[in-house]
Image (cartoon, coloured by chain):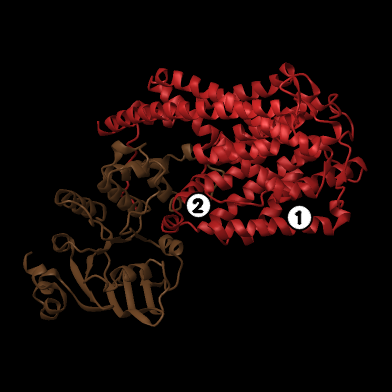
Chain colours: A red, B brown
Amino acid sequence: MGNWRPAVVARGGESALRFAPIDVGRWLTWGLTALLFFALPFVFKTGFAITLLSQMGILIVFALSYNMLLGQAGMLSFGHAVYAGLGAFFAIHALNWIGAGKIWLPVSLLPLVGGAFGALFGVIFGYVTTKKTGTPFAMITLGIGEMVFASSLMFPDFFGGEGGITTNRVVGEAFLGITYGPGRQVYFLIAVWCLLSMVAMYAFSHTPLGRISNAVRENPERVEFVGYNTQMVRFLVLIVSAFFAGISGALSAINFEIVSAENVSAVRSGGVLFATFIGGALFFFGPILGAVIFIFFAVALSDFTKAWQLYLGAFFVLMVMFAPGGVASLVLMNLRVMKYGLFYRLRDPYVGVLLSGAVLLTGVVMMVEMSYHLTLEIGSGTMMRLFGFRIDAASPEAWVMAIGTLAGGALAFEAMRRRFSRAWGAVQERIEEQIARDLRV
Amino acid sequence: MNTPALKLTDLRKSFGKTEIIRGVDLSIPVGERHAIIGPNGAGKSTLFNLISGRFPPTSGRIELDGEDITGDKPFEINRKGLSRSFQITNIFPRLSVFENIRCSVLFPLGYKYSFWHRLAGLTDAADRAQDILERIGLSGRHDTQAGLLTYAEQRALEIGITIAGGARVILLDEPTAGMSRSETDRAVELIRRVTEGRTLVMVEHDMSVVFNLADRISVVVYGEVIASDTPENIRNNQSVQEAYLGTAVADH
């Protein structure tokens, strides 16, 4: 095959830039992310904020690992918590062994234990699941998830039964004063591993295997005809993904000092799917946004209302219906509008939609909260606090007000939505025309 | 040195009770441009699917450069040096044109399933992909999403993906299907250029393309090769005339 002409690449600034040895933009992005991770606990100092940030970091790693399957390779898994959960179980046992002096390992390196066992189970289960694609793959992952969950209750010695396995993360000699006692120290451990995992997973998406996994997502049959065994591609990607899931599992073991059957459950697998999809599976940074939003719902909102899962579910449904590309695609599409200098045409429609949406949301929240209060907390009387006001959930006035707000909000929102939808369509059309014109040049 | 590039021996394929390929014997020497023609439903595409490993044959033998590849998987056959295109455009629609080509050069260049190489550092893969882009006339579409290309451009990309790996034997399934006259002419030039020094087997309905490109033509009717000869002899072959060509050939 000596008939390949020498490189003809150095034409035009764009292709030249592509081959720059050091990508300034990328270093800047990672540098700023690291700085942000470092600065966050100094800005949000409360214990609650640190808890929130720590859990976000853990879920970011988990969701990014999940997206190696869903977004990058087109593999819909309903059992990804298996890898994070089993990684967490092995990590927490290792931590207990460290505490008992049976093995020597710095707690800082514990995530590697989780990762190794995550990957090991990736090899074992992935060998079975990746024989199939599409719906059969999804069904098998669901089945394996149930199997592992059932086993975790069957072998209480290892899995701790209903109560799970508990630990104490403050073990061994303090290194440079780091004991992992205070939550902030744990946050920094999570932040470092989160950053390392993000960089590594981003780098993975720019390797031959990472790119071929994209091709498998697009058109698996064609990949077979350019020399790749797609089953092998899926298998390898699943192992790498399970490794990072295991890291996130170990981080959660350190953070919560408990791992139970819930860690391998379908609820967790569903949660990571929610987070990834809400954030946007088609973009690398999508799951990062999704993890932040999900933790916000699951941790922050759950402090205020018992109905947080209802809100999360509704949010998920709305995203799937109206923004299937997730929050990431919403961000990118608006950036595109700004890039073409057309955002001014959307500004007023946006204000209308957001204001009327806020009224509608208020109505919905009033109805939901009052219903929840009447059914779940009736024992404490019918008086409740809502948006800072004391109201009687059983009074007709409160319901008239709630229904009135809801109806008014719905009418206004529908009108505003139509207006917005027209403006949005017109703007997108303008942009598409412009792109088509550029393409023809 | 006379090992044929591709040799089919008594190849048969049945779907259920229906035998679609009914004992095909064919030998294609190295470097030949070979066209397979025949009426719709004669089994031409099935024949391609058997050779490229998409389906396993029911019986018979397929040899690539003397090596038995019967029953091999598509990726194994591809690694052994045979690459095919598809009648219905079969590309990676949401990847860029450049990525489409680069994906097809990675395995042959030895990067296989690597997750320890950075793509941006693989200048050989990038150079080769760039070279292919120029050969198929799509270097101006480097960063365009493949799914947004025009039909003719997608067909060119299809050929690009097929040849990029450097396979010695190229199978093209109706490369000019659905193209206008001028697009077809350009496609013929493209095929001639990019298959220089390789063995080409193509299924084609457009007789001007067939008689323009092929060194030898095989006529498949009802799952059998009824004639395999030079264009000149095929044109004058009585049984071919009766079975299939009729006036279609006389015009060329």
Q: Is residue A195 visible?
A: no
Q: Position of residue A312 (x, y in %)?
A: 65, 37
| Residue where numbered disc 1 is placed | A149
Q: Chain of mark 1?
A: A
Q: Position of residue B29 (x, y in %)?
A: 26, 69
Residue A373 is left or right of residue A238, and the answer is: right
Q: Nearer the viewer, residue A410 or B114?
A: A410
Quarter holding residue B31: bottom left
Neighbourhood count class around disc 2 (C-alpha, 10 Å): few under 14, some 14–19, many 20 upward:
some
| Residue where numbered disc 2 is placed | B112
Q: CA distance from mark 1 to mark 2?
A: 36 Å
Q: Nearer the viewer, residue A2 or A248?
A: A248
Residue B178 is left or right of residue B68, and the answer is: left
Neighbourhood count class around disc 1 (C-alpha, 10 Å): few under 14, some 14–19, many 20 upward:
many
Q: Secondary structure at mark 1?
A: helix
Q: Amino acid at mark 1?
A: Phe
Q: Position of residue B122 (x, y in %)?
A: 46, 40
Q: Amino acid at mark 2?
A: Lys
Q: Nearer the viewer, residue A242 or B78?
A: A242
Question: Residue B93's mark?
Answer: none
